[in-house]
Image (tube, rainbow, N blue to C red):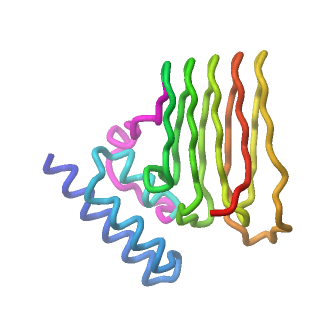
């Protein structure tokens, strides 16, 4: 527990440094700082500062090997709101429906999502203005990526999605807030 509290303090320091240096907007800083207190493991803390770290580790490599628990939907439906999402996330839908809603998420420069849908359906909702880089693989399943409703410049935030749909479906759509 003491190690996690020390890492929370270090994470807050890194966020403050990122805000002061202009790498984070005040909104991004406030959102991320608010999630430090509730973080349950090193993976959740790392996700809050991964784009700020460069070559500076938050903790030992052994501790960094652990990750936050993925968003799961097994034999049911689950909606994950922006406030529950992280900069680097994983999700799994097995015989269920999973919706990941990024509307209202304070995008920094780059976020990532790894997703698997097995005999289920996954829906990723993205606000306009976000560039999607994707590697979507259907295995006897279906994947679809809606085109961006806006022409985006190179400075637009990026969501990198790596996903597999096995006998399931995955849809990535743009929707206004």
Image side of residue 109 versus residue 71, left or right: right
Residue at the extreme left: 2
Asked if the stretch drawn in magenta spans residue 15, the answer is no
Drawn side of residue 134 relative to residue 38, left or right? right
Q: Give the residue drawn at x 30%, y 51%.
A: 39
Where residue 168 sits in the image (x, y, percent)?
Answer: 69, 21
Q: Would residue 27 be found to the left or right of residue 96 on screen?
A: left
Look at the picture and state if 89 lies above or below 150.
above
The vertical placement of 32 against 21, above or below, is above
Residue 120's spot in the image, x, y percent? 62, 22
Depicted 8 relative to depicted 160: above or below:
below
Nearer to me, 151 or 44 = 151
Q: Is residue 61 magenta?
A: yes
Q: Position of residue 68 (x, y in %)?
A: 39, 40
**93 displayed left or right of 2:** right
Q: How many marks?
A: 0
Near-viewer residue (155 or 54): 155
Rendered view: 168 above or below 54: above
Indicate the position of residue 66 as horizontal and vertical percent values: 37, 37
Residue visible at 55% across and 23% down? 96
In the rendered image, the quadrant that contains the C terminus is bottom right
Relative depth, front residue between 22 and 75: 75
In the foreground, 136 or 104: 104
- At x 54%, y 29%, the residue is 92
At 78% across and 32% down in the image, what residue appears? 143
First to last magenta residue range: 52-73
């Amino acid at each position: 527990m003491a190690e996690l509290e020390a890492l929370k303090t270090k994470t807050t320091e890194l966020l403050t440094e990122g805000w002061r240096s202009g790498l984070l907007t005040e909104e991004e800083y406030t959102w991320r700082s608010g999630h430090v207190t509730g973080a349950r493991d090193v993976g959740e803390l790392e996700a809050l500062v991964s784009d700020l770290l460069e070559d500076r580790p938050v903790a030992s490599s052994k501790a960094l090997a652990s990750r936050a628990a993925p968003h799961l939907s097994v034999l049911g439906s689950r909606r994950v709101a922006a406030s529950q999402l992280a900069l680097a996330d994983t999700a799994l839908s097995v015989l269920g429906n999973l919706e990941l809603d990024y509307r209202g998420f304070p995008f920094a420069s780059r976020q990532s999502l790894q997703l698997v849908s097995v005999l289920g359906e996954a829906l990723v909702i993205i606000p306009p203005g976000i560039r999607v880089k994707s590697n979507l693989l259907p295995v006897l399943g279906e994947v679809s990526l809606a085109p961006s409703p806006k022409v985006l410049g190179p400075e637009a935030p990026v969501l990198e999605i790596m996903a597999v749909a096995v006998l399931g479906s995955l849809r990535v759509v743009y929707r206004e807030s």
